[in-house]
Amino acid sequence: MNIIKSNDEELNALVDLKPPKVWRTAWISNYYVKWFILGAVIGVVAGISALAFYFTLKLMEHLFLGLIVGVSVPEPIGEGGSLASGFRVVNYWLIPVSTTLGGLLSGLIVYTWAPEAEGHGTDAAINAYHRLQGKIRRRIPLIKLVASAITIGSGGSAGREGPTAQLSAGIASAIADLLRLSPDDRRRAVAVGIGAGVGSIFKAPIGGAILAAEVLYMRDIESEVLFPALVASAVGYSIFGSIVGFTPIFGYYTGIFNPARLSLYVVLGIIDGLFAVLYVKTFYAIHDSFKKWRISNYAKPVVGGLLAGLIGLMAPEVLGTSYGWVNLAEFEKLSLFTSPVLPPIVLLVALPFLKVLATSFTIGSGGSGGVFAPGIVIGALVGLDMGLLFHYLLPSLVPDAAPFVIVSMLALFGAAAKAPLAVMFMVVEMTGSYQLLPAAMIAVATAYLVSGNNTIYRAQVPTRRDSPAHVGEYSVPVLMEIKVSDCELNKGPVVKIDESVNNAVNVMLQHRYTSLPVVNHDGNLVGVVHLLDVLGKRGAIGMYVKAVGSYVQPDSTLYDAWEVMSREGTTWVPVVKSGKLIGVLTMESMRRAYDLRISSAKSTSNKP
């Protein structure tokens, strides 16, 4: 195996190649025509996917909560609900039975046929964009649809947007393969599918289009997907709305923006930012605890469902999507909030915390569902508490809590998802409250600042330069000056050639790796094993090892490493010395060394 090298002619061609102006103009024209058509196709997929999941979820709610528990929960105005409908139940103590049964069935489906479909689907789709060249296994969309509908329909605390995003993105990935599109186009199709799916199920096409470009990064935007995402979201929204209606999910709020309250929205943004951190930290603390728990994966969603159901006994407002309760909070129908054990004031204060716990147990245990909608609900409940507090302290300035409920929805989850623009427009579309945009801008900016780098989507990367999808955008001359030995090597998990497939899969899923190096008992590099190649397989890992096309040595340059990553489509490269694997060089380690060299160069150039 030889290290990849480039001569000066190749490097000059890479840097200096500039196509003629006429050719570039034709390419741009063809690009927009192509993605207008592809965007429309993905929009049709998104609209149908949203409808399929919506009605499957309604069926599961009828089977579990309706027939088993005999429960009736408030529905949002945009889905036929009423502000006069509250919570009614026949077999109250069967709530935990329903959520536990839902966890059992969901776990059986997911861990039998598609283990990577567990958890929240949007994160998996983001991961496919950055690290899998947009590849999503064909079976995942169907598995995600059924498992998520069961999880939420049985009363589990989760959202509809994650499953719909993964469903749309998975089918978009399949369409890209069917049309034999390039890996870059397949990635774009997946991103467009994410935004169109979420925009359709939320009836928020503008927010969905922006989400497609924004949710991939913590502090950047993927401008290349905006155009097709606008087309796809509009088409998907039209299809979904034509069947279920175009009324915003939470109805129309007709209040008037009052600039005198701006300081209160800053305070609300601070609280939402802190609560966003709490949501993220709690979710992943519980998620990681379940991952480390040495019991069968099939049993974990059962435990999570049971715990969520017990919380539901205490506060039925946390069950399912909780959309109807958001409407009741928006219009201050406080008398309809109920708990068999908590006094009303205690219930209102506790609800945001209980929704965080119920969501964390439901999804963090391996149940299937989204984290977007729960984040919006948590924000609404925080906004209700803060609005009531402001009304108590300043009754003439704050006559009602509704504006704070709406603004808090977008501020909290905009910060938690690191997608402030998308969530801001999405919530405004879901409530028809465009006059609250100035308040929303202040609150979401404050919350985003307070929340720091905490994000509910672990698959996000900070910026485009940190994404494997844009590995070729590094500065080539600087990369040729930095040695591999200047970087910190990852000494993380490796797989031995006689290790079982099951152990290797568990390691990759636990650490969110898509591939790992394989060594023999002497520590010599044998090859690489890929997650997609061994899922559902048995035997020793040596049966599925692929030879390593290239590796680097400590005295190789980062440009050598970049070429290997670019060609292999990975985010890491093995580092070998005298035949033995001494570590793995990751893109993140390359970025740190690159930033250090650039900072040093800038510091030197600034000296007098």
Image (cartoon, rainbow, N blue to C red):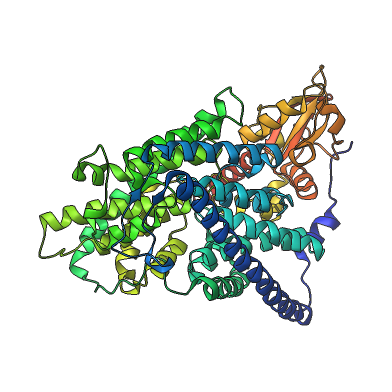
Q: Tell me, yes or no, if residue 477 can be seen here.
A: yes
Indicate the quadrant where residue 46 lies. Answer: bottom right
Q: Position of residue 66 (x, y in %)?
A: 46, 50
Q: Nearer the viewer, residue 164 or 341?
A: 341
Question: From the viewer's perspective, is residue 110 above or below residue 381?
Answer: above
Q: Nearer the viewer, residue 207 or 290?
A: 290
Q: Position of residue 546 (x, y in %)?
A: 85, 36
Side (left or right) of 7 relative to 234: right
Indicate the quadrant where residue 32 lies. Answer: bottom right
Q: Residue at x 48, y 40 (%)?
A: 98
In the picture, the quarter occupied by the N terminus is top right
Q: Position of residue 469 (x, y in %)?
A: 68, 54
Q: Give the tally of numbered discs.
A: 0
Side (left or right) of 605 relative to 395: right
Q: Residue at x 65, y 31 (%)?
A: 490
* Residue furthest to the top: 522
Q: Tell me, yes or no, if residue 415 can be seen here.
A: no
* Residue furthest to the right: 1
Indicate the quadrant where residue 311 lies. Answer: top left
Q: Nearer the viewer, residue 107 or 179?
A: 107
Question: From the viewer's perspective, is residue 515 above or below residue 233?
Answer: above
Question: From the viewer's perspective, is residue 1 above or below residue 327?
Answer: above
Q: Nearer the viewer, residue 301 or 443?
A: 301
Q: Position of residue 473 (x, y in %)?
A: 67, 56
